[in-house]
Image (tube, coloured by chain):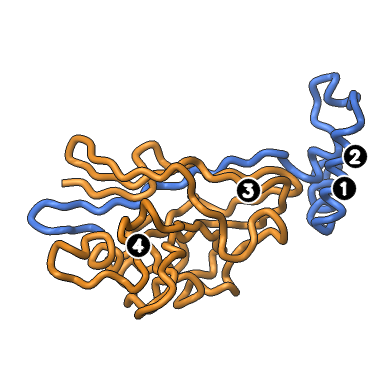
Chain colours: A orange, B blue
């Protein structure tokens, strides 16, 4: 099934996001300072993917499972395969919520993007273990988004890229 | 098919490099007569907006008795 919404991977919640809550081992090469120190990349994908929050961990990484490069949407120069890195990351608590956020993410310059339906947010620093480049969340754009020889910017939700509420 | 629809179809046939050259050439052609009159010019119709902002939905996990609706 194609894109319908945005979700956190259950396996990302199990580990690494809440790894220390139940003695769950962190992924290999997951930095001592976690997401704050690691490089978190954002890759664009078409509507041929089947986003599954409950996917086994081995299918949640970049270029694994449904998130293969064959389904990725790229620009040859300014949004290449693998995506672009988040900047100004934050992990903050509010009223009944903890949220991971970052600065809005723009392409590196003039580019052409065709039918990007959503993105995979993944930890590019995780390079070994059950899965490399483990996905944290997938975020839907609400439909196919395109630009020809223009600029392309992802505006994250005001409440964050992904969040936990209680 | 209307002229506008034809231009949009023509834009889809352009290679990325050609589209970028067309956009760059247009941007150097100041003033664009159509824009001067507050209208959409042929290049705009062919290439679409020069700036696209995509609004990404937040991924949310709801807790409580346990994490549900992840």
Residue marked by disc 4: A31
- Chain under numbered label 2: B
User: Does dot 2 land on a helix, a strand or a loop?
Assistant: helix
| Residue B21's disc number | 1
Whole-percent x, y for residue A6 in the image: 38, 55
The 10 Å Cα crowd at callout 2, few under 14, some 14 to 19, many 20 or more, is few
For discs 3 and 1, the disc positioned in front in the rendered view: 3
Given residues B67 and A49, the one toward you in this image is B67
Residue marked by disc 2: B25
Measure how far apart labels 3 and 1 are at the Cα level.
18 Å
Q: Residue at x 28, y 64 (%)?
A: A16
User: Does dot 3 land on a helix, a strand or a loop?
Assistant: loop
Whole-percent x, y for residue A31 in the image: 35, 62
For discs 3 and 4, the disc positioned in front in the rendered view: 4
Given residues A154 and A6, the one toward you in this image is A154
| Residue A64's disc number | none
In the rendered structure, the answer to whether residue A79 lies left or right of residue A140 reads right
Say yes or no: labels 4 and 2 on the same chain.
no
In the rendered structure, the answer to whether residue B60 lies left or right of residue B53 reads left
For discs 4 and 1, the disc positioned in front in the rendered view: 4
Figure check: A122 above or below A67: above
Residue A116 visible, this angle: yes
Residue marked by disc 3: A107
Q: Where does the C terminus of chain B fall, quadrant-wise?
A: bottom left
Measure how far apart labels 4 and 1 are at the Cα level.
43 Å
């Amino acid at each position: 099934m194609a894109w319908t919404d945005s979700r956190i991977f259950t396996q990302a919640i199990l580990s690494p996001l809440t790894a220390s809550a139940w003695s769950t081992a962190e992924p290999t090469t997951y930095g001592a300072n976690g997401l704050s120190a690691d490089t978190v990349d954002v890759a664009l994908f078409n509507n041929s993917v089947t986003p599954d929050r409950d996917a086994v961990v081995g299918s949640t990484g970049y270029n694994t499972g449904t998130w293969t490069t064959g389904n990725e949407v790229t620009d040859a120069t300014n949004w290449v395969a693998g995506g672009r890195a988040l900047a100004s990351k934050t992990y903050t608590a509010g009223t009944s919520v903890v949220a991971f956020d970052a600065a809005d993410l723009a392409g590196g310059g003039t580019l052409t993007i065709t039918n990007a339906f959503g993105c995979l947010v993944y930890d590019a620093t995780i390079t070994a273990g059950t899965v490399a480049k483990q996905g944290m969340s997938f975020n839907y754009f609400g439909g196919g988004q395109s630009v020809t020889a223009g600029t392309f910017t992802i505006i994250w939700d005001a409440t964050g890229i992904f969040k936990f509420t209680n | 098919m209307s002229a506008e629809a034809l231009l949009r179809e023509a834009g889809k046939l352009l290679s990325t490099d050609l589209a970028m050259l067309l956009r760059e050439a247009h941007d150097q052609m100041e003033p664009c007569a159509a824009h001067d009159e507050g209208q959409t010019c042929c290049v705009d119709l062919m290439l679409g907006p020069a700036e696209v902002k995509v609004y990404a939905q937040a991924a949310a996990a709801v807790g409580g008795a346990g994490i549900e609706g992840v």
